[in-house]
Structure formats: C-alpha cells, structure tokens
Image: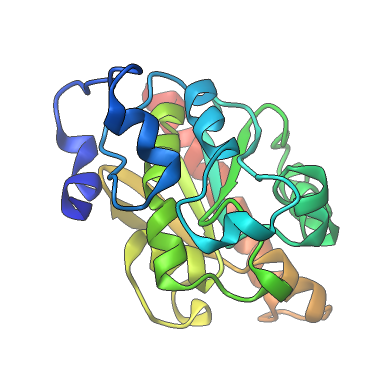
C-alpha cells in the first residue's frame, strides 16, 4: 500500500473515497486503514480528518493539530519535521523563531509566504520534547502528507532537514552533503535545504557557512520557479 502511495502521481485521475463508507470514516481512528491516493476531494476534508486523528500516540498529547499554513495553490511547498511548542499552541507550522526566519528567507528573494508558499510537516502533532518523530509516527501521518502534495500540486518541494528528506526521498545522507541539490520525486523537483533551526544555531555569515549556503539555495529555487513559470 505504501508503494501505491509513492506512485500516486503516475496514476490517471484519482477516486475520492465515499464519505459514507466505513473505511473512510475510520481513517482518523487507526493507522491500519490506509490513506490511498485520491482519498480526499479537497484540503478541507483532509483537515477535518486531521483534527480528529488518533492514528498514532502523538494525538493524545497535542494541544492543536498542525495541518498547514500558506496558499493551497502555491507553486512552492515546504515540508518540515513536526510542530514545536509554539506551533502546537497556535495550530500552525513554522510560527516560532524558525518560522520567522523561514519567512525572512522567502522574502529575501521576493517570495510571499502567504501567496507563494504552502507549509506542512512530516507529522501533524507535536512529539514530546520536540524529539524526532518515530518511523511509526511518520508512517501513520504519511498518507495525509501525500494527499496534501497531490491536492496542492506544487512545482517545487523544499525539504527542510534530514527528517523531511528521509520521509519523502528515503535518503539517509546528512543534510550537509545533499542540500542544494535537485532531486526528482514523482515527477516533481525537490531540494533538501537546512532547517531554519540549524541556521539559528549557526549565525556565521561567512562564505561557505550555513547561512551563506542557504542564500545560494534559495536563489536557485527562485530562479527555477521563474524558469518553470516561463515554460508554462
């Protein structure tokens, strides 16, 4: 079933599940029910299931489910690891210091976070102590994420940090080795980038440092978006 989800963008069309079916209604209650391609007709239906979700143990400890923020028709989709404390309190991803820096990075190349970007995470509930999500937690939430990607239909996906890279591309290489590189995934362009939290811990602006490298990466992303826009 997971392989089917990975291959969903190659399928023709997509069946939206019957909302009256028992399997559809059971999706938020157990990870044993797969979230197959075409399960949701729109992001509103997906968000409703996320709000009620108990597919893994993270649901029991959350304050709010953190589904997304930004424009559902954005050309750029950004995937993070999981909600932190402020995200859990506000119900939106990347709203703390990391999110503020991410917005500044976008603005530095004239990308509007409210217009040009859609942001979500590998998991939608905060892991205790902001730890890395377990493989079981990530797997329980992955169907939601794949459906978000399908419904938003972005031109480019940015993967912030190692957890996002592993969750989508399945790569285990360190982020410093693969950041700034273009990868093709399900017919889409993806680029691993540093997580903003890493940049906050590494303030140097020297050439070759994390902030300098991020500046190179985000300029390449903006150039690619412009190129794709001209091609369409």
Image quarter of residue 90: top right
Image quarter of residue 230: top left
Residue 143 higher or lower than 213, as above or below: above
Residue 49 higher or lower than 207, as above or below: above
Residue at 36% across / 45% down in the picture? 143
Position of residue 61 in the picture relative to residue 121 (left or right): right
Q: Identify which residue, 65 or 213, lies in the foreground.
A: 65
Position of residue 32 in the picture relative to residue 127 (left or right): left
Residue 219 image point, x, y percent = 61, 52
Residue 150 visible in image = no
Q: Identify which residue, 97 or 110, lies in the foreground.
A: 97
Q: Quadrant of the C terminus?
A: top left
Residue at 37% across / 60% down in the picture? 139
Residue 161 higher or lower than 45, as above or below: below
Residue 212 image point, x, y percent = 71, 71
Residue at 28% across / 33% down in the picture? 23
Residue 1 image point, x, y percent = 17, 50
Q: Identify which residue, 7 or 108, lies in the foreground.
A: 7
Residue at 62% across / 27% down in the picture? 71
């Amino acid at each position: 079933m997971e392989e089917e989800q990975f291959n969903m963008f190659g399928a023709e069309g997509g069946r939206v599940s019957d909302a009256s079916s028992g399997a559809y209604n059971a999706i938020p209650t157990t990870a044993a029910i797969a979230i197959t391609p075409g399960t949701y007709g729109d992001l509103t239906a997906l968000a409703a299931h996320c709000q009620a979700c108990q597919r893994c143990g993270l649901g029991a400890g959350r304050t709010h489910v953190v589904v997304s923020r930004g424009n559902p028709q954005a050309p750029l989709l950004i995937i993070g690891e999981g909600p932190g404390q402020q995200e859990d309190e506000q119900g939106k991803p990347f709203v703390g210091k990391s999110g503020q820096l991410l917005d500044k990075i976008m603005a530095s190349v004239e990308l509007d976070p409210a217009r040009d970007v859609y942001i979500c995470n590998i998991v939608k509930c905060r892991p205790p102590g902001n730890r890395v999500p377990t493989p079981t937690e990530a797997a329980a939430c992955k169907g939601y994420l794949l459906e978000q990607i399908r419904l938003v239909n972005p031109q480019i996906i940015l993967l912030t940090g190692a957890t996002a890279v592993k969750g989508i591309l399945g790569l285990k290489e360190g982020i410093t080795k693969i950041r700034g590189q273009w990868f093709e995934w399900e017919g889409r362009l993806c680029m691993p980038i540093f997580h903003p939290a890493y940049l906050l811990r590494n303030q140097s602006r020297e050439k070759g440092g994390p902030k300098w490298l991020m500046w190179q990466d985000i300029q390449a992303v903006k150039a690619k978006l412009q190129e794709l826009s001209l091609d369409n």
